[in-house]
Amino acid sequence: MLAALFTIPLFGRQVLTHCWRLIGRTRWLLLSLMLIFAWGGVGEPLWSGPFAPTRQGVDDALTHLGHLLLAFGGVAIMRATTTLGEMMTAVYQLSKPLRYLGIDPERGPIRLWLVLHYLAASPQPRDWRRLVSEPSSGTATTDFELSDIHLTRTDYLVIVMAVAGLMAFCYFI
């Protein structure tokens, strides 16, 4: 996990800046998880004395913290290397097989775009009272186009291998 974390800066300053921004926005979540796992786990105390975290709890906390940091790095890399239209097209293409289950694949990218749009357009004041008192701003529209590209056999092979790898990873953990 440490080797993967140390490869994130190799993707450039933009990725690193975005990753730090994500970490900064979730600092209280990360701190809460660290405290809950470190002091909530059972095991051998890290030091002798009252209110000592457990060694196993700290190990679990660092593992979960590392997983979240890897996820933040992956999001930062994806945001730096992929445009919004490409992300929406990928979501659309990956959700096309859900059509056989009666789920409309066009709704997923549209809902994802709406969430991303309103997150970017919402004000970011430090005081929640200002957020409540400010009137909502006008909504600017951004157009994007979903490409209806057809997946090749190689694409399907990569998807099947990724799902199989994920299933094997989850089975052995």
Image (cartoon, rainbow, N blue to C red):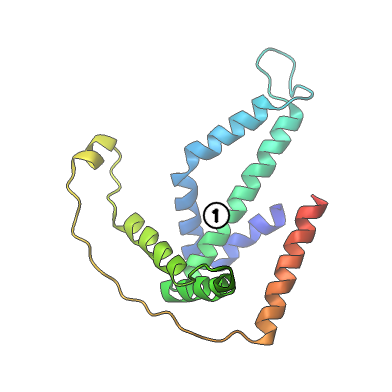
Residue at the limit of the structure toward the top, as seen here: 50
Q: Is residue 95 above or below residue 130?
A: below
On screen, residue 66 versus residue 107, left or right, reads: right
Q: Residue at x 68, y 12 (%)?
A: 50
Q: Is residue 82 visible?
A: no
Give the quarter of the image for residue 142. Answer: bottom left
On screen, residue 51 versus residue 171, left or right, reads: left
On screen, residue 156 versus residue 12, left or right, reads: right
On screen, residue 160 versus residue 122, left or right, reads: right
Q: Residue at x 64, y 62 (%)?
A: 7
Q: Residues within 10 Å of mark 1 (few under 14, many from 20)?
A: many
Depth check: give the residue in front, 130 or 156.
Answer: 156
Q: Is residue 165 above or below residue 37?
A: below
Q: Residue at x 70, y 52 (%)?
A: 2
Which residue is labeled 1 in the image?
72
User: At numbered mark 1, what does the secondary structure look like: helix, strand or loop?
Assistant: helix
Q: Amino acid at mark 1?
A: Phe
Point out residue 151 in the picture as x, y percentages from the top left corner. 60, 84
Q: Is residue 48 above or below residue 41?
A: above
Depth check: give the residue in front, 134 or 164.
Answer: 164
Q: Is residue 17 above or below residue 48?
A: below
Give the quarter of the image for residue 126. Answer: top left
Q: Is residue 101 visible?
A: yes
Point out residue 10 in the picture as x, y percentages from the top left corner. 59, 65
Q: Residue at x 28, y 37 (%)?
A: 128
